[in-house]
Image: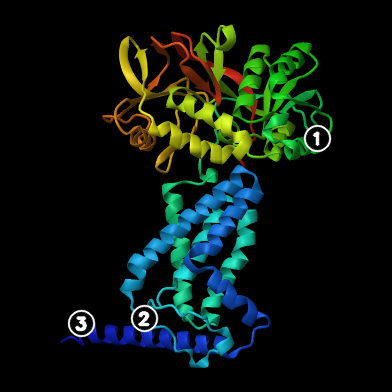
Amino acid sequence: MSDFYGVRPAAHVRDRVTARLSAWDREVFHRVAARHWPGGDQVLPRLSHTANHGLLWFGAAAGMAVVGRGARSRRAAVRGVASLAVASAAINTVGKRAVRRARPVLDAVPVVRRLKKQPFTTSFPSGHSASAAAFATGVLMESRGWGAAVAPVAAAVALSRVYTGVHYPGDVLVGAALGVGAAFAVRGVVPTRSQLPVPGRPHTDAPVLPGGAELVVVANRASGTGDTTAQVRDALPDAEVLECEPGDIPQVLEKVAASGRYRALGVLGGDGTVNRAAAVAARYGLPLAVFPGGTLNHFAYDLGIESVQDACRALAAGDAVRVDLGRFSPGPDGAPHGYFVNTFSLGVYPELVRLRERWSPRIGGWPAGVLASLRVLRGEHPLEAEVHGRRRPLWLLFAGNCVYRRMGPTPGRRHDLADGMLDVRVVHAGRLPGLRLLAAALAGPLSRSPVHAAERLRRVRVSGLAPGTPLAYDGEVTDAPPELFIDKKDEALTVYRPAPAS
């Protein structure tokens, strides 16, 4: 009866396929073991050892982040490491336990190729191959250049596992496939920049300036932008590039905008420098060209501008969008208004910025940011403020210029820079401020929780602030007045932005 229903024939076919695959696996293994690979005996065992515990890939990620000097390189490094972590966890918790295959017998492998310390885990699948493929695939998703550099090394690591006799080819192929799958799983949770829509509403025309004629670019000399400034000069030979000290930037921007000699205003620096240029450009009705060159370039990245070439493409085509400006009144230094292109905040973040700016000249921007965060989050001194007529203790009041969308577990990017809304978030005071801020970061824009509230609003009124309360806007810090009004200027600024690739 079982023959009639095909149970035994199906099992027989399965066994035959398994036997053939196993025979192929062993045959290829022995061919690799018997073949002499020029230079392989010196290189591949060492490479295989270097990849233990992911050390090779962690080192590669650190090198990419340092040498790359750009957001794309940093994202590629982070995505590669995240993909590796997922692949490693899947292999070690499920894969190795699901199929307990013994390691190959080393009789056919020359002694010079064998690893000094043999692995003791089961053979299927190859964890080294999974980690290598995951890292290379994750990097490639963010940067083709870095992906092309990493891929041959990842392939060599996978080959080394067969060459040194610790895995069968089938172990390596399945491990690599699982690694690629892990990278795609990470992309499903945290999309790449190329997957996210570039803010394109509302599109507007701007002067076409392919060589930079009638464009002036004001560069912040303190932003570490020397290389970027040279790139701008090379890419836009007809543009006038003015390098300025930070204290001179407001006066220079005002002077060139008021001169009437230029059809567009360019700025090279971080978000604080862009903030000053945006306010001047909006006031004089000049389109703004942003060249990312500071430590933080959130506004440029949200526009899809990650390099000088991106901005130059937009200038050459005259592609631009209108964007909102956040506004708070009264502004700093007695001005009627202050503006922000990214964020406005009261509470712990301005304190963090002050500490970071104080320490960064001595130890660098990123280490200073980490130490400042640790220092601030240990304190338990909430801000007292009255928000919309209700007085409350707060750890943080945040207002984003347009709504920030989630990139994985945290809100990290704006899809629309002209939505007319403020993304307002409040973290209530209490114990354990660090955990409260983490909970706020993980919560969505419209979430409700005991420690965090978020709303989309057109305007916010804050009063009852103590003298000396710090206020931060786009990374700049000043003292807040006793009462503040936060709102928007809709579509107040025209910014060059490269058209999405078709």
Residue 25 - label: none
The answer to whether 9 appears left or right of 19 in the picture is left
Q: Residue at x 35, y 12 (%)?
A: 386
Q: Which of 403 and 336 is in front in this view?
A: 336
Q: Residue at x 65, y 83 (%)?
A: 37
Q: Which of 485 and 319 is in front in this view?
A: 485
Q: Residue at x 48, y 74 (%)?
A: 172
Residue under pointer 1: 233
Residue 355 point in image, percent of width and height: 52, 29
Residue 331 point in image, percent of width and height: 54, 11
Query: Where, by quadrant of the figure, is residue 101 drawn?
Result: bottom left
Residue under pointer 3: 5
Marks 1 and 3 close (CB-CB < 8 Å): no
Q: Dividing the image into 4 quarters, which one contains the C terminus? A: top right
Return the disc, 1 or 3, that comes first in the chain's sequence.
3
Kind of residue indicated by mark 1: Arg
Secondary structure beneath disc 1? helix
Return the disc, 1 or 2, that comes first in the chain's sequence.
2
Residue under pointer 2: 101
Return the disc, 3 or 2, that comes first in the chain's sequence.
3
Q: Which residue is drawn at 66% across and 50% down?
A: 67
